[in-house]
Image (cartoon, rainbow, N blue to C red):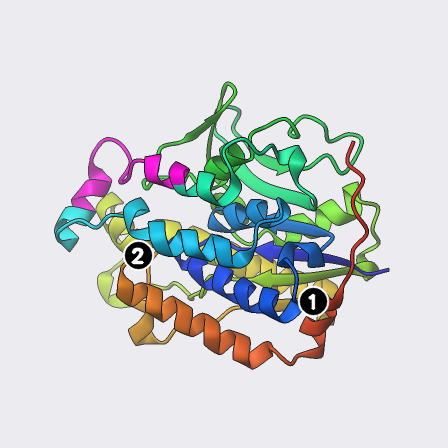
Amino acid sequence: MAFRILSLSGGGYRGLYSVAILRHLEQQAGRPIGDCFDMIAGTSIGGIIAIGLALGKRADHIERVFLERGEKIFPRSESRALRLLSKLRTGPKYKNAELRSAIDDVIGRDALLGDARTRLLVPAVNMSKGQVQMFKTPHNSRLVQDKHLLAADVAMATSAAPTFFPMARIGNSNYVDGGLMANAPDLCAVHEAMQFCGQNIENVHVLSIGTTSMKFSLPNSIGRDLGALDWLKNDRLLSTVMTTQQQLVTFMIGHQLGDRYFRIDREPSTEQSSDLGLDIANENRRETLLALADASYQDIAASPRLIEFLDHRPEAPEFT
């Protein structure tokens, strides 16, 4: 029997593209989109969406929160110079109070990770221990330590992007954004299905949704002697880490799964890409992201492979 995974990439406010795609898919399926999958994985903004869906929240609700809260989470500085200088100061660029408020609206303040009705995988980086952390529902007898965690705390951990937000704290550990090592958690989710859910790779199918991925490169004209200021400009360093990791994962998993891997993403035009950023949330950017999502959905709405995902009726997971 097919084991179907929904995997959601990170990408800051560009996650509006992902949740708009999910809203279209949910309308086509005629039921909560989270109920179409055996497992949901998500990193950073994708992790926030994944947790919400696994807890039974509808995609249009999550999208509405993003639309209403985006500019409060990412308030703009007066000029590019001030925005760049803000990254060099002591402390992160943004406070996380508005992010936490939006997460509470998406997920609920009191929901626990163990309350999810779908298997869940959410990557983060534990900076106190210096290791990768995979937050999980108790879908295996060995996975019992995360089920009592507040789901909103886990969402904060996976989305605590360095330089943008403070590190998140759970218990005695500090966490940063899972996008540093698994911006596209597709491969992590396949590993989870095989190692902890007893699945053979031949049964695993992945629907992966990006965040208007762009190939990040630098022109030779800027030279080779880039310093800290140069790498921080326009989020060059973080964008390099995120995009190259994502390219590697989608390449490898495409070979492993073949036509059982279905990736929805859209590379914006050169003109559009200058209008999109990890923390740009004004009206023009919203309209661009929603338009890209509409175009992507129109391209794949009639795909038999997509319809197989939307028609899937997973068995209820047994949590320990």
In the image, residue 199 sits, relative to residue 97, either above or below, namely below
Q: Position of residue 16 (x, y in %)?
A: 43, 59
Looking at this view, name the residue that lies furthest to the right: 1
**Residue corresponding to mark 2:** 281
- Mark 2–mark 1 contact, CB under 8 Å? no
In the image, what residue occupies the spot 44% across and 66% down?
A: 212
Q: Residue furthest top?
A: 172
Residue 96 visible in the snapshot: no
Q: How many marks?
A: 2
Let me know if residue 274 appears in the view.
yes
Q: Closer to the camera, 232 or 262?
A: 262
Quadrant the C terminus occupies: top right
Could you say where residue 133 lies in the image, as x and y percent from the top left?
58, 34
In percent of the image, x 78 and y 60: which residue is there?
313
Mark 1 neighbour density, 10 Å: few (under 14) some (14–19) many (20 or more): many
Question: Height in image: 206 above or below 181?
Answer: below
Which tag, 2 or 1, sits closer to the chain's start? 2
Instruction: Please tell me how crowded label 2 is: few (under 14), some (14-19), or many (20+) other residues with Cα within 10 Å.
Output: many
Label 2 or label 1, whichever lies nearer to me, is: 1
Is residue 284 found left or right of 16 in the rendered image? left
Q: Is residue 199 left or right of residue 211?
A: right
The x, y position of residue 299, in whole percent, is: 55, 80
Which amino acid type is shown beneath numbered disc 1? Leu
Residue type at the position of mark 2: Ala
Quadrant in which the N terminus is drawn: bottom right
Magenta range is 84-101
Q: Which residue is mark 1?
A: 310
- What is the quadrant of residue 92 in the picture? top left
Which residue is at 35% across, 53% downward? 68
Q: Along the line of sight, which residue is nearer the eye, 125 or 101?
A: 101
Q: Residue at x 77, y 36 (%)?
A: 319
In the image, residue 127 sits, relative to residue 53, either above or below, namely above
